[in-house]
């Protein structure tokens, strides 16, 4: 009888060990993966709000259409981000970070052509920086699922950037904003992005704060 109990305990240990092994076999996320999930989620939230602002405050139909595209595409992207984060037990914030909120608030105070100029320059700058962050995840991440998010997002962000650049060529004007710091120039140096920037901007003159994509902090 004792021998039978020992055998049963040994079998149970094997079964439990196998279950634990299956759990452990799931790909671990490194710090890059976790940070990227938070950053990408905040970018999605910010792009959605920026897109809504474009639809509400722009007088240019092409800008409004771009805003709707940002809302639609980043809503879809964020659904995938949420699913992966939930599975990986990575908590996501409910709102953009403080810098992103400040930049969105500044955009919300603008109207008409000034809004269009600032919004386009901000979106272009931010999407360029977002592409850099996507590449960082692809090179430095460890989770196949998280890296797949970056892989899937990259062509979407690239297409946004191409369309934004095209729109800027057709709608930009030399009129400055009331603050006098947002006047367009041949380069993309007008403002940090309210939507896509995940890292410190190299082009911003809108404010001394980092671009709204921030650092995910």
Image (spheres, rainbow, N blue to C red):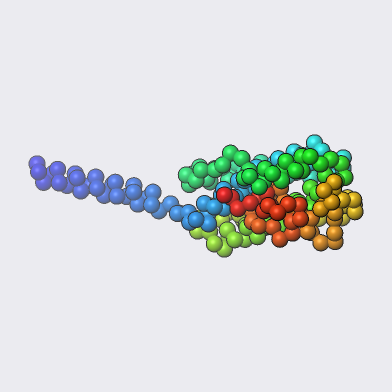
Q: Please identify the residue farthest to the top as the structure is shown.
A: 56
Q: Position of residue 117 (x, y in %)?
A: 84, 49
- The image quadrant where one finds the N terminus is top left
Q: In the rendering, at what x and y percent does residue 25 appear? A: 40, 53
- The residue sitting at 62% across, 61% down in the picture is 135
**Which of the 4 image quarters holds residue 67?**
top right
Q: Which residue is more in the foreground, 53 or 23? A: 53
Residue 129 placement: quadrant: bottom right
From where the camera sits, is residue 33 visible?
A: yes
Q: Is residue 160 visible?
A: no
Q: Which residue does the image show at 58% across and 46% down from the upper left? A: 81
Picture coordinates of residue 45 (x, y %)? 65, 42
Q: Considering only vertical position in the picture, is 205 above or below 55? A: below
Q: Which residue is located at x 65 percent, y 50 percent?
A: 213
Q: Residue furthest bottom?
A: 139
- Estimate the x, y position of residue 58 in percent, counting from the top left: 84, 40
Say which of 30 and 87 sits in front: 30
Lateral position of residue 174 relative to residue 15, left or right: right
> What is the tally of numbered marks visible in this picture?
0
- Using the image as rendered, state which of residue 184 and residue 14 is in the foreground: 184
């Amino acid at each position: 009888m004792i021998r039978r109990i020992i055998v049963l305990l040994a079998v149970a240990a094997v079964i439990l060990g196998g279950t634990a092994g299956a759990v452990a076999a799931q790909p671990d996320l490194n710090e890059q993966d976790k940070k990227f999930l938070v950053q990408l989620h905040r970018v999605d939230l910010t792009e959605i709000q920026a897109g809504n602002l474009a639809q509400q405050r722009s007088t240019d139909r092409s800008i409004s259409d771009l805003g709707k595209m940002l809302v639609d595409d980043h809503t879809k992207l964020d659904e995938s981000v949420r699913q992966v984060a939930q599975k990986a037990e990575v908590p996501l914030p409910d709102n953009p970070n403080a810098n992103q909120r400040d930049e969105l608030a500044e955009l919300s105070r603008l109207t008409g052509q000034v809004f269009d100029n600032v919004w386009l320059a901000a979106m272009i700058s931010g999407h360029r920086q977002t592409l850099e962050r996507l590449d960082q995840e692809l090179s430095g991440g460890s989770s196949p699922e998280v890296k797949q998010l970056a892989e899937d997002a990259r062509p979407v962000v690239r297409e946004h950037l191409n369309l934004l650049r095209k729109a800027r060529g057709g709608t930009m004007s030399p009129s400055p904003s009331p603050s006098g710091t947002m006047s367009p120039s041949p380069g993309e140096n007008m403002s940090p992005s309210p939507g896509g920037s995940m890292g410190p901007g190299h082009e911003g003159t809108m404010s001394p704060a980092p671009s709204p994509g921030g650092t995910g902090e």
